[in-house]
Structure formats: C-alpha cells, structure tokens
Image: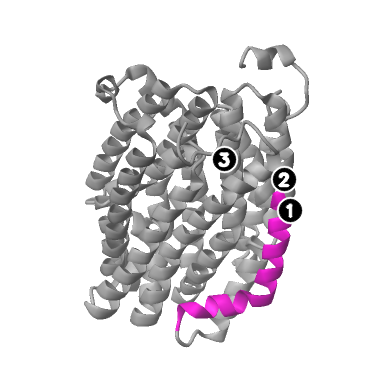
Amino acid sequence: MGKSGLDMTEGRVMRSLLAFSIPALLANMLHQVYTLTDNIIVGRVLGLEALAAVGVTTPVIMLLGSLIFGINNGVTILLSQAYGSRDIPQMRRSFYNSLYLGLLVAAVMAALGTVLPVPVLKLIGTPEGPLRDAASYIRISFFTSFCPMLYFLFSCAFRGMGDSRTALYCMIVSVTGNVFLDLLFVAVFGWGVAGSAWATALAQFCATALAAVLLFRKYPIIRPQPEDWRPQGAILKRIAGLAIPIALQSAFINLGSLAAQAAVNLFGELVMGAYTAAGKIGALALLPLESLGSSLSVFTGQNYGAKKAPRIRAGVRAGLLLQLLFSTALAVLLALFGRQFTALFLTDPPAEMLDISFSYLMITAVPGILAGVMFVYQQALRGVGLVRDSMYGGFVQLGVKIAVVLIGAMALRSLNVIWLAWPLSYIAGAVFVWLRGRRSPWIMGSAQKEAVQRGA
C-alpha cells in the first residue's frame, strides 16, 4: 500500500513490534531533545531563574499538547485500522477531516494564549522572578500552536501506515533546526527565554513542510481526491470520539503535573530548578517505555482492522516483555549516572540541587516497569477503539497523583512524598486498565469468540 509502510498484520509479532518501535523510539527521544536543548541552553546562558521560568511552563504547555496529542492519536488509530482493513478512501477522509479539526483547535489556542498565561502561572504560585519570562514563553507557544499541530498530524499519518522511519527523518530535521535556532536566538541574538520558544516553533514549521512533501510523494494513495476536501460529519464525529477521551486522559496526567508543579513552587527557585532538570531527565528515561506502548496502539489498530484477535493478544505479551527489558536497563542507567545527567543543566549546579534531582529520579523513574505495564494496556485498549476505558484509567491515575501530592506538600512538607505520587499513580492506572483489558476478547483470553468475529 506504500513504499515504506509496515504491514504488522503478518509475520512474527516481536519482529513487527521492534521494526516499528525502534524508529518511533528514536523519533520520540529526539523530540525530548527539544525540551532538553531549551533547558540546557537557557540554564547555561541565562541562569537558574530563567531555567525555573522555562520549567514552570511545562505543565501548562503540556495541557496545550493534550489537545494536539488527542487529535493526532485519534487519526493514528483510524488510519491504522483503515490500513489493516485496506480501506483507502477511509484513510484519506480521516486524514483531511482531522486536519480541519486540528486547525480549528490551534486557532482557539492562539486566542487563549493572549489571556491565560499570567493568571494560570499565578494560580500555581509562580514566584515573581520567573513569572514574566514564563508568561512570554507560554504566549508564544500558544500563538504558534498550529506548528506542532500540523507537524504531529503528518507524523501520525506516517505512523498509522506503519512508516515510523520517515517520521524519524522529519524529527531529525526538526531537532537539528531547533538546536541551531536555540543557540542563535538565545546565545547570539540575546532574545532570552522568548527566543527558545520561537526557535521551537520555527523548527517545527520547517519539519512540517518536509513531512508534507514526503507524505504525498511516498504515498500517492493519501493524495486528496475532490470529495476528500468536504468536511464529513460522520468522520469528524468518529475522530472526536477517539480524540476527546485521549486528549482528556492526557490532560488529566498534565493536571497532575500542574498540581505537582504548584507544590514544588512552594519550596523556592532552587527546588524548581532541580525539579525542572530532573523532570526532563525522568521524562527522557521513561520515553522508551511510552514509545513501546504507543507503537502497540498502531500494531493493535492494524490487527483490529484485519480482525486478528490472537495476534493482538500476542502483541500485548510481547509488549510486556519488552517493557521489562527496557525498564531494567534504564533503571540501572539512572542509578549510575543520574547526578551527572542533572549537572548538565547549569555550569555550576549547587550540591543541594543535585541531591533533590537524584531523589526525584530514584523515586519516579527507576520503578519504570510500573509505567510500562500501564502504557501497554492503555494503548492496546486504544488500538481496539476502547478509548473511554483508557480515559477512565487516566481519571484514576490523576486522583491518586493529586492526593499524594497534596499530602506531601500540605501535610508533611516532604519532597520525597511528593515524588511518590508518580509510582503510586502508575500502579493505580496499571491495575485499572489491566482489569478493563480482561473484559475485552481482543486483548486478553480467548472467550467470546463470536463477539470478536462480529468486530465488537
């Protein structure tokens, strides 16, 4: 169906997952280089206060990313299911209708970016020092939200057809451009924290243009036909039905991060800087587990479209094994080099900051297998269209995280208790989606074969 698309409905399950997951993992790791580059350059060039300013924007920016994530993952699921069932017209209609929906959301976000930043930052207790730079960073990110929206839409189109390699190539261009522009705008032009935000947006815009050219050249089947340009209510409704629960689930997770950021802000700028640095390292360490999980949603979607339930269940088992292997290796790496990684963010980091960051990594990221199990069942549920079940798991995860953060911040005034919110929320989320997966004949067991044959 395309020059480089990967058909995961045939062949060995583990080989199919790895063939798709490795390029996807590299692309997602490179995406984290965006924020690492921003933080390292800002911290080293502008200092601790500027690093804290960028760090405090992260949960707010991620709330914006929740909408982008939801829409684009919704279209990935639809494209992978259509790819598995060989329904080419459905693939095109899903892509172009998601484009309309994404541009509408980006327009709304650009408008909200003019009024929300300062009130939200004050709500979470941002100190006056980092407040102005943080507000500027958020305004620019919201105003330019169409750049990541379009970029990830094209990236998800590649992924839905099993082509994670081309998505990786586009990410390489984007990250390379971002590093160059960050250095130019922040270190050379002296644009401060705002320069970092503009660098990210411009790099994503260039990568979008490249992705559009590659998509239409490599996959003529996705080129629009006259009837594809018309918005279609049924498809928009289906995209929204997938996108809204995914976006809400991502928003729940980021609301938990927002609560954690508010708690961290109570401890001052040094702790804010430590949390910013360690948070980026922790996110990068957990990224292989998250990437394996998201790859499973494409694998599951294709096999759901092809009506191959036993293959889906084999994919879940393979995904769990890979999560165990990756999480063990990452835990050892963090235990050995966690302090050195954190020290990259400042030219002369205080010893107390390194101690705080290391404690965060040991408690939140080392027990990564907990998150890995949760990711597997979340994404398997999404791939077979059970996005609401995955969303309900997000509710559970959010509730546990906020409860533990409040206990740690308000009752005990303990950072280590706050950090416990991460592994405890992973346990709660994993148990919930595992229980929901047991009810689906697509994901676990071999019962209810008639339901599978009907496509239920």
Nearest to the observer: residue 374 or residue 172? 172
* Residue 376 visible in the snapshot: yes
Q: Residue at x 56, y 75 (%)?
A: 341
Quadrant (top left/top right/bottom left/bottom right) for the C terminus: top right
Q: Label 2 sits on what residue type?
A: Leu
What residue is disc 1 on?
324
Image mark for residue 320? 2
Q: Which mark is residue 394?
A: 3
Query: How far apart, in angstroms, are the residues tagged by discs 3 and 1?
Result: 22 Å
Look at 27% across and 38% down and name the residue there.
Answer: 103
Determine the CA span between mark 1 and mark 2.
6 Å
The residue sitting at 31% across, 51% down in the picture is: 210
In front of the other: 155 or 413: 155
By secondary structure, the bulk of the magenta-drawn segment is best described as helix
**Counting residues from the N terminus, which is met first, the one under dot 3 or under dot 1?**
1
Circle 3 — which element? helix
Q: Disc 3, disc 1: CB below 8 Å? A: no
Q: Residue 189's quadrant in the figure?
A: bottom left
Q: Is residue 156 magenta?
A: no
Residue 389 seen by the camera? no
Stretch of the chain drawn in magenta:
322-346
Secondary element at image label 2: helix
Lateral position of residue 33 relative to residue 25, left or right: left
Q: Which mark is residue 176?
A: none
- Amino acid type shown at disc 3: Gly
Disc 1 and disc 2 in contact, CB within 8 angstroms: yes
Q: Mark 3, mark 2: which one is toward the viewer?
A: 2
* Quarter of image, res 399: top right
Q: Measured along the vertical axis of the image, is residue 33 above or below residue 402?
A: below
Q: Secondary structure at mark 1?
A: helix
